[in-house]
Amino acid sequence: MTTTTSVDTEDDDDVATTTTAAAAASSSTLGLITFDLDNTLFAVEPVVKEANAAQIKAMHEAGFPTTNEQTIAHQTRQVRSKVKKRITYTNLRKKAIRAEMERHDNGSSSSSHFELVNDLFHVWLNERHASAERHLLDGAIEMLKALRATYPEAYIGAVTNARGNPLDMPNTLAPYFDFCVSGEDPDVFPERKPHKGIFHATLDVYSEMRRSSEKETNMDETDAAGDVVEDETDDDDASSSSLRWIHVGDCLGNDVWGSAQCGAMTIWMEYVSENPSSFSSATASINKQRLKLAAKGGRHVDQRITKLSELPKAVEVLLETAANAEKKMKSGAGRGLIEKAMASKESTRSGGPRPRANRRKR
């Protein structure tokens, strides 16, 4: 695949220099790097605003002329206050759309509403992805190119609580990502970040994709007579026991603390929004809990960055630090080891393999 959209940055030279330097390090040690999406790779505030605007326009065209941001926000808060158990963001939005439609129809609900609700939701979702491609943070594409060039064997995945999916962003992020795990996925919800369940699901996807890739490689190395070609790769360099996992995200609680509990090394993307979120429907108790988790996460930051052009260097530093600690048998030598994270993972999760739509063939 090729990229048709890129983001210019003043730090191109820095990224290139870091890539060259990192190539001299052990590029085979990075097995998996996972990213949060909202406010890590793109600014979520304008993305959701534009997606909401597309949904409202579609509702006007469908015969609901008084719908606006305020009425949608009101319906969302009303739905959330009435549900007795956790609800996916998808169902929350669909229920809010239905409630808004019924407001126009004086509380009545028709069978035609069901199909229209789904159509309106997908108008919102499609615009969310299109808008995300327009609002990538500076240096996002250059950073991903640098990672791919320096660590070609590593897997790059997304771990998000929301509905954004880099594989649905063909002009920007899709060429660089191998898979996406969402807290909305049926076999993950309600175990979204910072719950271990979503990170364990991520490790399951990585493990399955790696096994599949190795199987295909072994088949390719079989000659026409059916004899296996001898593998001349150095065992130490190829050992999967040295592969590391790094997670990158802007949320100290969901991303840093959550992934660290499952064995990842962490990079905190300290994102400062010029416009605070205006669309969150989280309750006061949920926000209080998030503050507590953020305090915990602050103690598990392995590297901190303030712009994406700094990430390749942060990855290099983490891998070098881990390798040096391992050589000297220092405390923390096992930080980020995928093998160790897999070994400590809870028993195999139910729900079967990940949906194929959330991954791509390498």
Image (cartoon, helix red, strand yellow):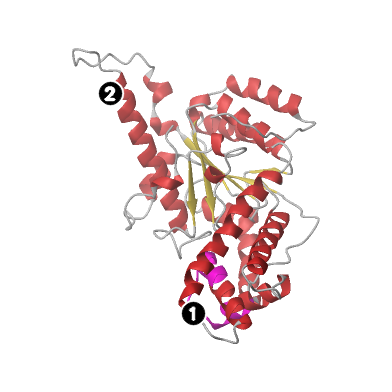
| Numbered disc in front, either 2 or 1 | 1
Q: In this view, does 39 lie above or below 287?
A: above
> Which secondary structure lies at badge 2?
helix
Which quarter shows the C terminus? top left
Mark 2 is on which residue type?
Met
- Examine the rendered structure and indicate whether residue 185 appears above or below residue 358: below
Residue closest to the eye, 210 or 339 = 210
Q: Is residue 337 magenta?
A: no
How far apart are the two marked residues, 2 and 1, measured between alpha carbons?
55 Å
Q: Is residue 336 left or right of residue 232?
A: right
Report the disc number at residue 110.
Answer: 1
Left or right? Give the position of 174 relative to 47: left
Residue occupying the point 44% across, 38% down: 360
Disc 2: CA contacts within 10 A as few (<14), some (14-19) or many (>=20): few
Query: Within 10 angstroms of label 1, few (less than 14), some, or many (20 or more) residues?
Result: few
Q: Is residue 84 found inside the magenta-colored segment of the image?
A: yes
Q: Quadrant of residue 63?
A: bottom right
Majority secondary structure of the magenta segment? helix
Vertical placement of residue 66 versus 16, above or below: below
Give the mark, 2 or 1, whose residue is nearer the N terminus: 1
Q: Position of residue 39 (x, y in %)?
A: 68, 51
| Boundaries of the magenta span | 77-94
Look at label 1 and name its amino acid.
Ser
Which residue is pictured at 49% across the width and 29% down the height? Answer: 29
Tell me the SS state at disc 1.
Answer: loop
Residue beneath disc 2: 219
The picture places residue 124, in percent across and down from the top left corner, at: 61, 59
